[in-house]
Image (tube, rainbow, N blue to C red):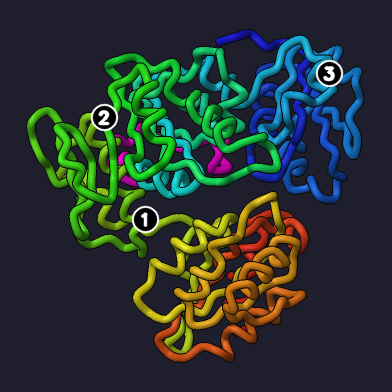
Amino acid sequence: MEDYRGKKITIMGLGLNGGGMAAAQFFATKGAEVTVTDLRPASILKPSMDMLSQFDIRYVLEKHDFADFENADIVIKNPAVPLTSPYLAKAKRIETDISIFLSEFKGDVIAVTGSKGKSTTVSAIYHGMKKLKSDTFLGGNITISPLSFLEELTDKSLVILELSSWQLADIRGKGLLKPVVSVITNIMHEHQNRYNSVQEYADDKKVIYQSQSKEQFTLCNHDDAYGMQFFSETPAHPIWFSENDMSMDEQIWLAGKNGYIKFRGKTIQILPEKLLIPGQHNRKNLLIAAAAMFLYGFEAEKIMDALADFRGIPHRLEFVQELNGRKFYNDTTATIPQACLAAVKSFEEPVVLIAGGTDKNLEFDLMPEIARNVKSMFLLKGSGTDKMIAELEKNHASYNGPFDSLEKALEEAYKASASNDIILFSPGATSFEMFKNEFDRGNSFKNLVNEKI
């Protein structure tokens, strides 16, 4: 392990979801001189700062100073900060919590990326693996920095990593990521406020497999337009997964409600028919999870038992409560229209949808199809909602609102619902005009359901 005693470490971006805070704590405990710099005020960052109160950390808030970057031995950047930042241009050495972790950890990694489904997939892998291998940990983009548990690991530990395109871009060319199994769930029109094209975005996803060996595995989506690029380029052993039987010598696929893998001449069921989370897309996510566990070396029967009681994760088609025959679901992490459409198609019951939010340079031409799949739609105000409304009106699709508060939208949605309906909060857009982030948005919805309805 590298010796950080006395080194000057600048953490760029403290945040509220683990990465910056875990890095600050890690380096402070290693005897480094830690400076945290963040553009936000202490009033916003107080929860993270309180968690670090026992450490001698210098804070520079509501601004960045070039000197903190020029004088640092190492700058730890937040994934949301572009590498083109003029402050980073002053740094001698740039790392992230992921790159530091991968430099130090020598055990096995299973890594998952993609536009949608990656959090559910890694959580399912972790849920199942934890039952079969107790020395299993989960971290990455799922708001748990792997630095927070690095000291607990041995070379025999298994770490499941969810990695965003930004986190992968930050480790490009370092040769640090060598997962036993890598997964790319899908590529969608995402983060185009940061990328010049979808291809550029997909290119960052490729980092997940670029340092793999031929003895390792890359799982590629046969139903995705970019799947062939990944399948043909990976240096690892590629295997297709799909919602359909592809009639290939090696494949992972769904057949009805069951899931199978064909591998080394054998066809084996790896996914149970009965699952606790709704939706065909979630069934596919759990199929990928089961395949990763199988390729890691566990028996199919044990995998099916381990995944049968997986209940999903907070904020992703999360069941909140049932009231007067109506079931409320929180799907706040549906930040693009494709995810919203997948959510509304997850239910056999009539769906009353609450959607809308902030635009991030997305297309909303799926809104008419979403409208056709719901009983009624209630929209929150926002720049993304304005584009949604334009598509809905162009196609003569009905909607209600837009409403200037989630409380009002929920009240009206409840009034329009009936017993046996699903009231689904799946925005199909980001959140920043009304909320701090999608988690704040989801918690607000759950609180309103539990307190107001």
Q: What residue is at 80 percent from the left and 26 percent from the top?
A: 85
Query: Upstream in the sequence, badge 1 or badge 2?
Result: 1
- Foreground pick, 406 / 149: 406
Query: Upstream in the sequence, badge 3 or badge 2?
Result: 3
Cα separation, mark 3 vs mark 2, equals 41 Å
Where is the C terminus found, in terms of image quarters?
A: bottom right
The residue pinned by badge 2 equals: 296
Instruction: Classify mark 2: helix, strand or loop.
Output: helix
Question: Label 2: few (<14), some or many (≥20) within 10 Å?
Answer: some
| CB under 8 Å between discs 3 and 2 | no
The residue pinned by badge 3 equals: 69
| Residue 447 at least partly seen | no
Residue 134 drawn at (x, y percent): 32, 36
Query: Upstream in the sequence, badge 1 or badge 3?
Result: 3
Q: Which residues are magenta?
A: 127-145
- Foreground pick, 156 / 249: 249
Question: Label 3: few (<14), some or many (≥20) within 10 Å?
Answer: many
The residue pinned by badge 1 equals: 282
- Foreground pick, 207 / 14: 207
Residue type at mark 1 is Asn
Residue 251 drawn at (x, y percent): 21, 37
